[in-house]
Amino acid sequence: MPLDRDSHIVLYRQLADILRQRILDGILPSGTSLPTEFELSATYEVSRGTVRKALSLLNDEGLVERVP
């Protein structure tokens, strides 16, 4: 699902929504690694800062856990 660059919804929120739905649908199962920030950035054609904000939202919701 591509991001809508003309939407009033900011890109990081759109990306978080996409990733959240993929997690809830089991496409990204619990316990598995998400794609890297670099991979997500390339896939969705956004900056790593945008990816970080999206992942931070999901982290705050308890859907992902950031592990160094």
Image (tube, grey):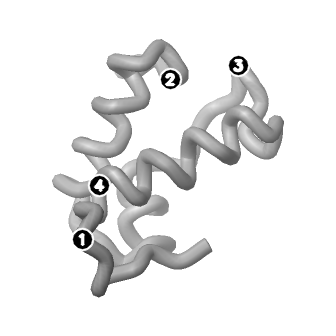
Looking at the image, tell me whether mark 4 or mark 2 is earlier in sequence order.
Answer: 4
For badge 2, the amino acid type reads Val
Mark seen at residue 25: none
Q: Position of residue 34 (x, y in %)?
A: 58, 40
Which of disc 3 and disc 1 is earlier in sequence? 1
Helix, strand or loop under label 4? helix
Q: Nearer the viewer, mark 4 or mark 2?
A: 4
Task: Kindly report the distance in space between the C-alpha atoms of the residues bearing marks 3 and 2.
Answer: 9 Å
Kindly indicate whether the residue at mark 3 contacts the one at mark 4 (C-beta within 8 angstroms): no
Mark 4 neighbour class, 10 Å CA radius: few under 14, some 14 to 19, many 20 or more: many
What's the CA distance linking mark 1 and mark 3?
Answer: 33 Å
Residue at numbered disc 2: 64
Return the x and y of residue 20 as percentages of the image width and height: 57, 39
Please identify the quadrant where the N terminus is shown.
bottom right
- Could you tell me which secondary element the residue under label 2 belongs to? loop
Q: Pointer 4: what residue?
A: 12
Q: Earlier in the sequence, mark 4 or mark 3?
A: 4
Q: Position of residue 14 (x, y in %)?
A: 40, 58
Q: Which residue is mark 1?
A: 8
* Mark 1 / mark 2, whichever is N-terminal: 1
Residue type highlighted by circle 3: Gly
Q: Residue furthest bottom?
A: 6
- Residue at the image position 29 percent from the left and 55 percent from the top: 12
Q: Position of residue 52 (x, y in %)?
A: 26, 44
List the residue tagged with mark 3: 31
Distance, label 4 to label 3, CA atoms, is 23 Å
Quadrant of res 30: top right
Disc 1 packing (10 Å; few <14; some 14–19; many ≥20): few
